[in-house]
């Protein structure tokens, strides 16, 4: 099963992708996390994308499609994958359609006010990209539940950059909702709820995907 999670920054894509990955036995692939790993390794690609990411802008399509294509060619993607943060532009969606057959684009919807308050309190694991907040705190304060790394605040979660990321989302990523609607792949999920409730809604929607009654 090949799934896409769509949604504004702070809509819970990363959190839900990690939970779904575990429940469905599929890899969760975040292009943002792939770029952050390149930045942490100080690779030429990491250094190229650093100022772009720190400004809250999108990395150019050619670089993004290249890193995604390389990740999808790894053996763990053979049985399927969950994409978190890709595609974000129409050319990326068109490139993805050539790389894989998509089963659904699950769009997490949440009001802007909730996004700003979620991101302003968010702590992220620099190693595995797990995200924590007041609503879903880590078990041990300040440390990642999954890999025990010390949590920090993403540099692009500052209020000014969040504002820019939301504007970029509206301008460049929102058109994907019509793209996937036209391809009969769009499923909207109300994500303004506790993480476990959103997971239940997603799993119910996924279970419904292959039922014949779906239009
Ligand atoms: P994320 O971790 O998904 O919030 O992504 C963090 C940042 O990585 C974004 O603000 C972009 O700068 C960059 N990025 C991640 N995925 C993409 C993508 N599909 N296209 C372009 N830039 C991306």
Image: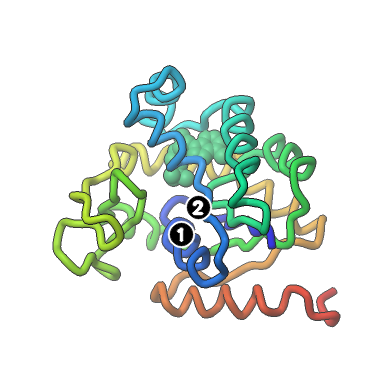
Q: Position of residue 164 (x, y in %)?
A: 42, 37
Residue to which mark 1 is pinned: 11
- Whether residue 105 sits left or right of residue 33 in the image: it is right
User: What is the distance, in whole Å, between disc 2 and disc 1 at their CAs?
Assistant: 5 Å
Residue to which mark 2 is pinned: 8
- Quarter of the figure that contains the C terminus: bottom right
The residue positioned farthest toward the left in the image shown:
141
Residue 165 shows in the view: no
Label 1, residues with CA under 10 Å away: few <14, some 14-19, many ≥20: many
Say which of 181 and 137 sits in front: 137
Label 2, residues with CA under 10 Å away: few <14, some 14-19, many ≥20: many
Residues at circles 2 and 1 in contact by the CB criterion of under 8 Å: yes
On screen, residue 47 above or below 168:
above
- Whether residue 205 sits left or right of residue 182 in the image: it is left
Q: Secondary structure at mark 2?
A: loop
Q: In which image quadrant can residue 63 be found?
A: top right
Residue drawn at x 28%, y 37% is 155
Residue drawn at x 71%, y 79% is 208
Q: Position of residue 209 (x, y in %)?
A: 73, 73
- Res. 117 mark: none
Say which of 201 and 164 sits in front: 201
Q: Position of residue 146 (x, y in %)?
A: 30, 60
């Amino acid at each position: 099963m090949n799934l896409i999670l769509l949604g504004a920054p702070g809509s819970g894509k990363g959190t839900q992708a990690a939970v779904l990955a575990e429940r469905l036995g599929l890899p969760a692939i975040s292009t943002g996390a792939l770029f952050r790993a390149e930045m942490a390794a100080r690779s030429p690609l990491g250094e190229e994308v650093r100022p772009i990411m720190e400004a809250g802008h999108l990395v150019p399509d050619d670089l993004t499609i290249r890193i995604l294509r390389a990740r999808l060619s790894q053996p763990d993607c053979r049985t399927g994958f969950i994409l978190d943060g890709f595609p974000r532009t129409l050319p990326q969606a068109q490139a993805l359609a050539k790389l894989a057959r998509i089963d659904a684009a699950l769009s997490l919807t949440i009001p802007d006010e909730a996004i700003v308050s979620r991101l302003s309190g968010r702590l992220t694991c620099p190693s595995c990209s797990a995200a924590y907040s007041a609503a879903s705190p880590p078990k041990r304060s300040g440390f990642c539940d999954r890999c025990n790394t010390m949590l920090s605040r993403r540099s692009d979660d500052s209020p000014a950059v969040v504002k820019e990321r939301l504007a970029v989302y509206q301008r460049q990523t929102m058109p994907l909702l019509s793209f996937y609607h036209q391809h009969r792949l769009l499923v909207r999920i109300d994500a303004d709820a506790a993480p476990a409730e959103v997971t239940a809604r997603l799993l119910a929607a996924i279970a419904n995907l292959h039922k014949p009654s779906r239009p």
